[in-house]
Image (cartoon, coloured by chain):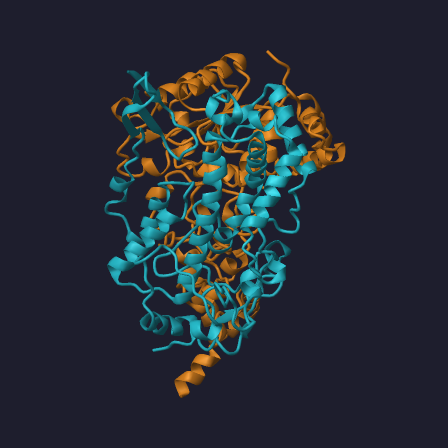
Amino acid sequence: MKRVVVDPVTRIEGHLRVELTVDETTGKVQDALSSGTAWRGIETILKGRDPRDAWAFTQRFCGVCTTVHALASVRAVEDALGIQIPKNANYIRNIMAASQATQDHLVHFYHLHALDWVSPVEALKADPVGTASIQNAILSKYDLGLSGPVEFDTGAYPKEFPRATPSFFKAVQDKVKKLVESGQLGIFAAHWWDHPDYRLLPPEVHLMAVAHYLTMLDRQRELVASHVVFGGKNPHPQYIVGGMPCAISMNARRSSASQRYLAVTRMSGRGPLTSVVIHSPPSAVWSASAVPSPPSAIGLRTICAPGWATSSASRTMPQASAAVRLPLNLSSATTIFTGSPASAHGRRA
Amino acid sequence: MEKRMTMWESFSSRGISRRTFLKTCSALTVLMGLPFTDYKKVVEAATKQPLPVVVWLHGHECTGCDEAFIRSQSPLASDLLLNLISLEYSDTLSASSGEPFEKHLESVIKQYDGKFILAVEGGVPLADQGISCMIGGKPFVDILKGVAQHAAAVIEYGSCAAWGGVQAAKPNPTGSVSVSKVVAGKPIIKVPGCPPIPEVMTGVVMHLALFGQIPPLDSQGRPKQFFGNRIHDTCYRRAFFDAGMFAERFDDAGSRAGWCLYKLGCRGPETYNSCGNMRWWNGLSYPIQSGSPCIGCSSDGFWDNGPFMERLPNIVTPNSLTNADKVGAVATIAAMVGVTAHAVASSLQKAKYPPVEPPKDEEQEKEDKH
């Protein structure tokens, strides 16, 4: 029997220690113990504080899976106090939770987990032509063929990313080669790259995964742009108990930086859509234009979008709340509404 | 010891053009808050200085600062990790773990003794000999002390490392303190924020790497170029504060129109950070722009400065005669009574404080009539 201790376990949030007893003759694990080796006492700290602040403390449990603890906390407080939030606030929270889930899966899969079975060293042996053909086979096999609006580019590899080519994978391979040769391995240093399990996958797959690792390191940030738009930052966007704070009309902001993230508002007013997430600017039925850079024009311009925008938010809130009680956590953390704008907004008490 | 690459060698060996290299240098110059006349110095340093070796320790933290770090857009995360720094030890990103990983730390310390940058994320728990945070069977505080004495400089990355953070909020059950409470004798830079803006960290690391010295710091040890201003000073809603136009509730007309969030508890007037000018995601937004009052996450002890949605007391408005409560009243009275004796003064007042009335909700009026 041999006792193996892995401490620290890396590529996780926090601190973890794993102790194993292994039978050396069979290679089987006889006993295992895993323990978190950090305790911060946030539960204790939270006691006696203002419930409206609880989300901020709770959110600091984890910065990798940020937002979700805050969302749970905000929902718990609302549930305890019997607060029903406006529908639009629920939409926004759902958008944020869904984009977090997507981004977190991606980061977990590539940057936290993949290096357990993907090796940059193995990738050096790959034939880039083989990698490209594997990649293209995967893309065509798993292409869902969803036809979204052209401008939103819903394909697995968007148009600006036509990279499943031998030359692209060759370039990635060269980059990794330079890194290995330089001896400054950085985050890839001191690992058991010679472990036989790294040879379970063919080198071509290793190269593909390493290419994904590097590309997704740059792209993951884009997936949580909704947190920055609605919550102000990421990790740890801002919430309020009772709704969402982002009341300003996005239509009113004309900055070029934000235009590309305005898919949400650009989709409005087209009639029924297949996968509508939100139809209106955040919680604004009447959207008063923000004055982005005072002192140019201090004053107000109100826009009323006809059809589905019929009253002020304060007016709609109690009615919308009374009309539909959204399942806070019955089946899942997120609810995505489908249907036409009319069906989503038409119900009134 | 093998020769360490410079930034230019790193770029050129990966087939990145000189033009891109120079563009990166000019971006870094701006990012580090240097005047553009220093551009040549940056290029020279980037051509000569070896890439910085960074050791990143994790104490009592949530890994949010790490995540913020890889959200960096200019430069992009993969560039940062592979071309600009050599991140030799990081709990979150390193492939290795367990014993080989700890051995690697020892060898890095030996190899780059006195030359590496130590970035620390998270607070340091001291209660019960530091057992609240153990790494490799040793208390974090011991590891930190051991590594820090070999570092060239220490960066306290995030509010936990800089001030103690959320775990140091009352009653601080783990006895957590900031890094500078247990490390002495080294240059220490505080980069507070929960989490800090990604590009701020990039700027600080590159400044250290290229010039081999710490950037100018303020009295609390924070780099002046990023923490020299209050968010209030650079806030795009500042004019609404000055004009006495405040959102009173999260669902009122002022809130929808993007008025000042001061009365909803905004900590902007006492928080030093770059949110107002740099913002997040390369200028996309920051909490106030998203309608949420600042919670002051880069301030010392902000966790105990709650409730976050309660307004700060008595921040004096710029005319220094009144506070936020009185501004609206003064403007209204001036408009209603129209004191002739103060005609000159009130005309000035009017220019500064236009009549503050929430926009009329015509639809609502229509409905009320029905």
Taking the image as shown, residue A41 lies to the left or right of residue B102, namely left
B334 versus A17 height, above or below: below
Choose between A227 and B236: the one closer to the eye. A227
Q: Nearer the viewer, residue A55 or B94?
A: B94
Q: Position of residue A154 (x, y in %)?
A: 57, 56
Return the residue found at the far front.
A26
Q: Position of residue A250 (x, y in %)?
A: 54, 62
- For chain B, what colour was chosen? orange
Quadrant placement of the N terminus of chain B: top right
- Front one among B315 and A234: A234
Q: Work out whether residue B34 can be spotted.
A: no
Q: Position of residue A207 (x, y in %)?
A: 59, 33
Q: Position of residue A173 (x, y in %)?
A: 64, 30
Name, please, the residue furthest toward the bottom: B370
Q: Nearer the viewer, residue B159 or B137?
A: B137
Q: Colour of chain A?
A: cyan
Snapshot quadrant of residue B53: top right
